[in-house]
């Protein structure tokens, strides 16, 4: 254990060290080891335990002292972001691209590799379709980078494509919300008109029907206005960096 880690652990009481809570669920043992070591380097005691559900392995839970939970989650988030950045960088390494395209068991990677035989225009058009779906599905950035590198894109080209698709999806989401807001306003106006008919109408049957219609229009307006405030799912936006050619 590092001097930093040993010093920080002395700041915790025995009760703190016994009172631990899960801070993160790692999917693989290497990930759990990497994150626990990152926590130890930050001076936070941590250990991983297998997580099982009805006898089925569900990864490993990383436990930390409850008193250090917030700090531990920040360390974990930073460690995962750094690992992700290294993975994206490595995906465009020439040897990594060669190893990726040799993996003939991965149908998606092989499909991306076959795009190299097409013209740049045809390749880019098909990649846009794929990238738009990957962005919405929140595909892991490292996997996305491997696919784009297999298709022959450099890191700079891949970043530009992913950012373009993310921006396009944000714009489309904003337009949908604007339409929903407008439709909600239309329903509210309709509800007011029907309410006025109820107030001044004389036929009891028509007034009863108008009451139900006004309520339905008002509820529909509320639903549309609520949906217009839906937030866009977090989309990956690649930060620029040193270009590593993946040709």
Image (tube, rainbow, N blue to C red):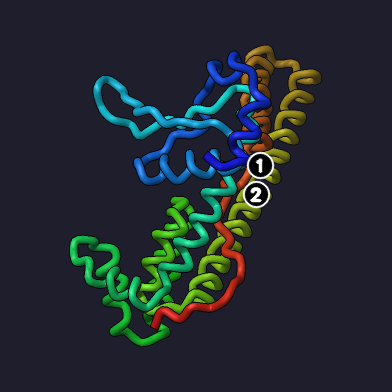
| Pointers 2 and 1 in contact (C-beta within 8 Å) | no
Q: Is 115 displayed left or right of 40 in the figure?
A: left
Question: Can the viewer see residue 144 in this picture?
Answer: yes
Which residue sits at x=28%, y=63%?
108
Residue 44: x and y in percent read 58, 34
Question: Looking at this view, is 219 or 40 the one in front?
Answer: 40
Residue count near mark 1 (Cα–Cα under 10 Å), binned few <14, some 14–19, many ≥20: many
Residue 28, above or below 100: above
Residue 19: x and y in percent read 55, 16
Residue 97: x and y in percent read 34, 73
Residue 1: x and y in percent read 52, 39
What residue would you read off at disc 1? 228
Disc 2 is placed on an element classified as: helix
Which residue sits at x=53%, y=78%?
243
Q: Residue furthest bottom?
A: 119
Question: Looking at this view, is 109 or 19 the one in front?
Answer: 19
What residue would you read off at disc 2? 179
């Amino acid at each position: 254990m590092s001097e930093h880690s040993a010093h920080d652990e002395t700041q915790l009481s025995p009760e703190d060290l016994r009172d631990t809570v899960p801070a993160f669920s790692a999917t693989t043992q290497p990930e759990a080891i990497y994150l626990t070591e990152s926590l130890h380097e930050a001076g936070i005691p941590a250990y991983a335990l297998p997580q099982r559900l009805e006898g089925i392995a569900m990864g490993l839970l990383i436990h930390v002292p409850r008193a250090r939970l917030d700090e531990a989650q920040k360390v974990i988030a930073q460690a995962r972001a750094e690992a992700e950045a290294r993975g994206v960088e490595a995906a465009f390494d020439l040897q990594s691209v060669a190893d990726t395209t040799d993996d003939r068991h991965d149908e998606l990677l092989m499909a991306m590799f076959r795009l190299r035989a097409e013209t740049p225009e045809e390749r880019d058009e098909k990649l846009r379709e794929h990238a738009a779906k990957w962005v919405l599905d929140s595909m892991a950035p490292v996997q996305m980078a491997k696919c784009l590198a297999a298709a022959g894109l450099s890191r700079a080209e891949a970043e530009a494509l992913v950012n373009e698709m993310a921006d396009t999806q944000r714009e489309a989401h904003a337009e949908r919300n604007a339409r929903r807001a407008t439709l909600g306003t239309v329903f509210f106006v309709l509800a007011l008109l029907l309410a006025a008919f109820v107030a001044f109408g004389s036929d009891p049957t028509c007034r009863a029907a108008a009451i139900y219609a006004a309520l339905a229009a008002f509820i529909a307006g509320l639903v549309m206005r609520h949906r217009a405030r839906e937030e866009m799912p977090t989309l990956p936006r690649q930060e620029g960096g040193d270009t590593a050619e993946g040709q």
